[in-house]
């Protein structure tokens, strides 16, 4: 696409050679000839001078020069996103119907427009809603139900009786409904398995990342509320309840029977102990270890987690400890001096 | 089932409408009409008043009222577990024999009653003991041996030569026997792979969670002892030895060549450095980072891990640091005052 | 193999019964009759007396006795590695060609000597270079390209447009190219998915561990540089760039758009926040939480991460806090005493 045409489509003002052929979008550092890049985050201003892109999308207010053509726009982030979509070649839509190598039980019910990929296994009693895509090599166990317009990527597995809503996206390798981790300790120190008889419920518009594991409940439901988004390699234990529109970042772990409210944010690698309540709108910092309930809209950090202002102060003081030790040492010397003089 | 019949089966005393039809079990908060719920953990007493269950199983000693029928029993946790089993509809038993789509090498030896699911791949020299279930889409590589009465869920993969005992359960997506992470650094800073020629041994009654990874040994064995239970997304590196009846909670990581004794408990997200010994009965707190050997039955916390009493004290003091700083400041002021007076 | 023959092959000096039959290698603790073991790490000297091996490889300088035959060598670690290879029975080489159960699109291009295992799915436009092995049950999505001499273990999945270099090894269950975790928050608090239109690039000689997840870029590339090695269960978010010959240990997490240089080492379970730069040769300690850029060759520890000397000092001081508190208390008492005397 000629740069002048791109600028027009983005509603931007072009400065530079209108005839340059743009073929792709790329980040400031990665961009090369034929790429259009963008500046949005002020942190990256210094990188503009070094970009090898053929053109850059900048805010209207941009005052410095650039080593390539410019497109000035109101919102450079949005304009770049639009450019990205203009240059994107989408992969083909998965074909409707059941691939001949898929093994689909005769008692399964498939809606209209459903796609079941190669080497899938769909067990007895499964129900899949209209226009849902079950990509290759997925496994849907006995009597799982999947709503409409879902998209399961390859190698997803769902254990028996799981209930999955509409427009749910599940990425490769995720496991929905594995057994909860529950054992009864015997007198001789061995453990016997506690049957895990409950299910997993994923409500509408949930997205589950790659290689995530969500355990079924001991009884009842492990439930992920409407619109909640889960990043890769997250572990959600049995009987956890997550509210609506919450966000669980990469490698988060939630122990058994904890309840999260709505609009909760768990940053990467944090952990939530069992049987806790994390109230609506709470935010948990990266790597925090939560051992207590968190009130509504609180922001906690640290392991063990504490209110983030306290955690920051504690951390700052910890770094100042050597100075404090010196001050105590000086006090001791001065006091000894005084005491000596008094004795004389 | 009528409530009166349920109470009889649980050996409990009914208070309320004997004719209520109960259809399922559920937690206090999730329960609705037709559900029976229970109170066992005193933490949840306050939730009883709000339950929407049709009946609740309580300890004999329960003195408050409830918004639904009651069944009093000696052990409400056990009675609820029994109720759960009464209402549970189990999925069908996997069919014996080899699914026609499975690819099983002619040299593999399958015991009596073995089930091999759709799209499995069983390589040459594999041996599977009587009554073991290899669910759909699993991969057993060259000369792996699996004992009797094992249950592998879908999409489990086991690398060559692994030795798996009896009654071992492996959940979806777990990887047994991937290469250890070992490289020799060359003079130019590149790394060459050190061959990982050992195996993984899982002894009897081990359970392995979903998407767990257990690396094969460089030489010899990575071994998980009899009865040890491993939760989801745990990482066990090459040449790790775990004793009997130990418990590894979600997202734990153990670096290469460390040895764990028996009855060890590793809480969620903790990490064990390489070449350490964690002795029998040791307990490691959640998110702890273990850098030293742990003596028998010690309980450590923190990162780096220390004895848990010390860790708690250090943590408490850290929070009190601002006060300590104030006290030092006051001391300095008072001392200056004294010194000034002395000079006068 | 007779022990005398093994000693000859290792270029070592034998002390003990030349005729012993050796069948395998094993670690000091695990070895039994018929095994040869070794001592290299001085930490394990005490275990020599208890080994049940039939022979042990020791450094020439070894002065103590051993409960079995000895082979003295210059480098016991290397000699043991060689012994390991002598006794190793390799699994069969994967057969060339496409397994009849694999589903390979007619438009895919397979080089010479390529092996595609049972139940694989190779979508349209995929290109696989000469002598690469795609083991059973893998999924290569639309227009992914794989170089020469790669080895993908079973159940690996690669999303559309990924570009994979030569000699790349990917272990079971790894996911290459899952969607980045990006959403736009709407006024009503719900989130809409930001299309993830970029790709993943793995350069030559990269190795990716079991159940690792590497997200595709929002635009452009998530890129892992030549020779970088990634351990199990690592999470790499969208638009992350990793340089050459870096090492990412087990369960590490890297948030979106961070850049790592070359020869960077991330120890187990550490986390890197988004939009950071970790410069060449930096080392991040286990479980560290990196919130700031790291200069070249710096070594950081702790969460939040700080220079490792500072972290060690802060940690040591934290443990000494109770003593410091006592000293302040004594100062207060002594000072009160002085003040009282002055008033009298």
Image (cartoon, coloured by chain):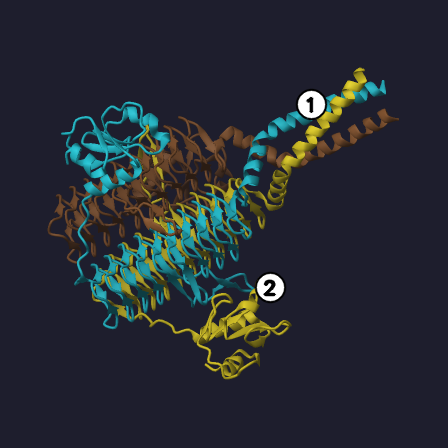
Chain colours: A yellow, B brown, C cyan
Could you tell me residue B71's position as x and y percent?
39, 36
Could you tell me residue B193's position as x and y percent?
31, 49
Q: Nearer the viewer, residue A20 or C286?
A: A20
Q: Is residue B186 above or below residue B61?
A: below
| Residue reaching furthest to the left | B106
Q: Is residue B256 something one can see in this rendering?
A: yes
Q: Is residue B72 something one can see in this rendering?
A: no
- Quadrant in the picture for residue C10: top left
Q: Nearer the viewer, residue C124 or A327?
A: A327
How many residues crowd around disc 1 within 10 Å: few (fewer than 14), some, or many (20 or more)?
A: few
- Which residue corresponds to mark 1? C330
Q: Is residue A136 above or below residue B169?
A: below
Q: Is residue C52 above or below residue A305?
A: above
- CB-based contact (under 8 Å), mark 2 and mark 1: no
Could you tell me residue A58's position as x and y percent?
58, 72
- Quadrant in the picture for residue A73: bottom right
Kindly state the secondary structure of the residue where label 2 is placed.
helix
Residue drawn at 49 percent across, 59 percent down: C257
The N terminus of chain C sits in image quarter: top left
The C terminus of chain C sits in image quarter: top right
Residue drawn at 47 percent across, 66 percent down: A30
| Residue reaching furthest to the right | B344
- Which residue corresponds to mark 2? A42
């Amino acid at each position: 696409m000629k740069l002048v045409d791109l600028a027009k489509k983005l509603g931007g003002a072009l400065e530079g050679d209108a005839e340059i052929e743009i073929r792709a979008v790329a980040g400031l550092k990665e961009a090369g000839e034929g790429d259009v890049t963008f500046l949005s985050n002020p942190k990256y201003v210094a990188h503009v001078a070094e970009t090898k892109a053929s053109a850059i999308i900048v805010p209207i207010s941009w005052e410095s020069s650039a080593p390539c053509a410019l497109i000035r726009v109101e919102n450079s982030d949005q304009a770049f996103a639009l450019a990205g979509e203009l240059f994107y070649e989408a992969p083909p839509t998965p074909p409707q119907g059941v691939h001949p190598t898929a093994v689909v039980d005769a008692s399964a019910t498939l809606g209209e427009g459903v796609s079941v990929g190669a080497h899938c296994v769909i067990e007895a009693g499964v129900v899949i809603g209209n226009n849902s895509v079950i990509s290759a090599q997925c496994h849907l166990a006995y009597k799982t139900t999947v709503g409409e317009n879902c998209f399961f990527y390859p190698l997803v597995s769902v254990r028996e009786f799981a209930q999955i809503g509409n427009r749910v996206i599940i990425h490769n390798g995720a496991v929905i409904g594995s057994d909860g981790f529950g054992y009864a300790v015997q007198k001789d120190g061995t453990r016997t398995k506690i049957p895990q008889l409950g299910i997993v419920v994923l409500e509408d518009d949930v997205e589950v990342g790659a290689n995530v594991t969500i355990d079924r409940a001991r009884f009842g439901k492990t439930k992920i509320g409407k619109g909640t988004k889960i990043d890769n390699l997250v572990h959600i234990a049995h009987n956890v309840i997550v509210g609506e529109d919450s966000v669980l970042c990469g490698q988060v772990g939630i122990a058994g029977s904890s309840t999260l409210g709505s609009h909760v944010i768990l940053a990467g690698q944090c952990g939530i102990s069992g049987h806790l309540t994390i109230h609506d709108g709470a935010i948990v910092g990266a790597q925090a270890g939560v051992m207590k309930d968190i009130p509504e809209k609180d922001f906690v950090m640290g392991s063990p987690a504490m209110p983030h202002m306290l955690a920051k102060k504690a951390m700052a003081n910890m770094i100042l400890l050597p100075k404090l030790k010196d001050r105590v040492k000086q006090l001791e010397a001065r006091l000894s001096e005084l005491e000596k003089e008094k004795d004389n």
